[in-house]
Amino acid sequence: MAGCGSWVFLLTVCAATLFGANAEIKFSIPVGKLFTYELMRETFQNDFEPLSKLYAGRLYDDPMIFKCNRQNFPDLPEWLRFTQRHPFDNGFLYGTPTSPGKSIIEIYAVNKRSYETARHILVIKVTAENMLPYQAEFFIKLREIEKVLPSSVQDEIKQDLQKLWGTEALEIVNISNALDRGGRVPLPLAGHFEGVYVKVGSEKYFSECLQRVLTPEHQRQCTTGAKVKVPGGCNYCNIPSNCISWCKTELFDLTKLEPEPPAPTVGSGILEAGIDFDPPESPPSRDFFPDYMVTVIVPLILAILLCALLAYIMFCRREGVAKRNARSNQIQLYHHHTIHGNTDELRNMAGNRGAQPPLSTLPMFNCRTGERASPLQSDSPSIPLIMAQHDPYSDTLPRK
């Protein structure tokens, strides 16, 4: 009997595990109200280790990552967001629906220790409801999105805003991360936070403290970047991390919004009987010659002028070799030709090692005629006077 009872209990636990993994979690929320659902790691931990806690007495605390998507779709609905900071933290699904409908969300949990997976189904039914007419959005600088989404923190923020608004009939409409609104990523240091936008709504009109946000003096202080003074009697911040930034506070009066124009009626696309089709008239003829002149002729003329100017500079402005030599100093020209001649001679000697000694090694020579001339008897201005230096050890060197 005892054995039969143990088997029944075991089958009951297995059936609960098998069918509970695919159980549907259903929610019904109205349009324009904040939806928040916390993905508890403990819930999925029981799915991974259902019998270890009962029999072995072990309770794991494994790191997990969550992946959420709309059923048969790769992403979540456009109004729904998911956040999880660390595998040891719980995840959050949050957002504000804008239109009625039904969304089926698949939640997959991956155990980073055993790499097991668990699957839950979340069914969200959005019902139609009128939007709250008066809404206000506040920026909380010292908060992060995953620290605001728990219900206890939302209640704390809601209580401060109820005192500021002067009514308890206040509902949180939306919570969004400052990074999703174009904010900058903070430094990874203590005291730096991403920031959170909290939007609330009510049936009651704005209080006097909130209406001071619309005054020109307050807007001028925010524009100049000066330190904005909190209006007297309007500081209801009990927790410093929940204090709002007055310069980023915005008020929305939905009663003054102009109604959207009605959508155009779509016809059947078939003309009624007895109505002739009147095609539109042809557009007037257009002269494209001015466009052709500007696009083709003008650049072509400019190209021709540039080519003519370049040809004049390259060919007509050259002075020629004869004119250049006539203006140059004769001694300078002589040295110039000597350098070229010596270069050619050294090149010829490099090809034939048995050649005669170059003329440039002699005491005095004429590079053109090869004639030796005494430097003391040369009076020509075109030949430089180079004094031959006598080496006292030249007689001792062997000669071939």
Image (cartoon, rainbow, N blue to C red):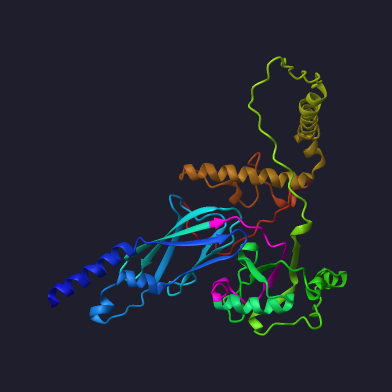
Q: Write the residue at 58% across / 42% down.
A: 344
Left or right of 217 in this view: 59: left
Q: Residue at x 64, y 25 (%)?
A: 269
Q: Residue 149's spot in the image, x, y percent?
A: 55, 72
Q: Is residue 216 above or below residue 327?
A: below
Q: Pinpoint residue 163: horizontal percent, then vertical percent.
A: 71, 79
Q: Which residues are magenta?
A: 126-151
Residue 396: image location, x then y, percent: 51, 62
Asked which quadrant contains residue 226, the reply is bottom right
As for residue 141 lying within the magenta part, the answer is yes
The answer to whether residue 241 is visible is yes
Q: Nearer the viewer, residue 380 or 350?
A: 350
| Residue 377 in the image, given as x and y percentages of width and height | 74, 49
Q: Quadrant of residue 94?
A: bottom right
Which of these two is toward me, 197 or 223?
197
Residue 142 seen from this side = no
Return the residue nearer the eye: 248 or 275.
275
Q: Is residue 268 magenta?
A: no
- Residue 369 sits above or below residue 86 on the image: above
Q: Is residue 238 above or below residue 325?
A: below
Q: Residue furthest right?
A: 216
Left/right placement of residue 179 relative to residue 297 reads: left
Q: Is residue 33 left or right of residue 136?
A: left
Q: Quadrant of the N terminus?
A: bottom left
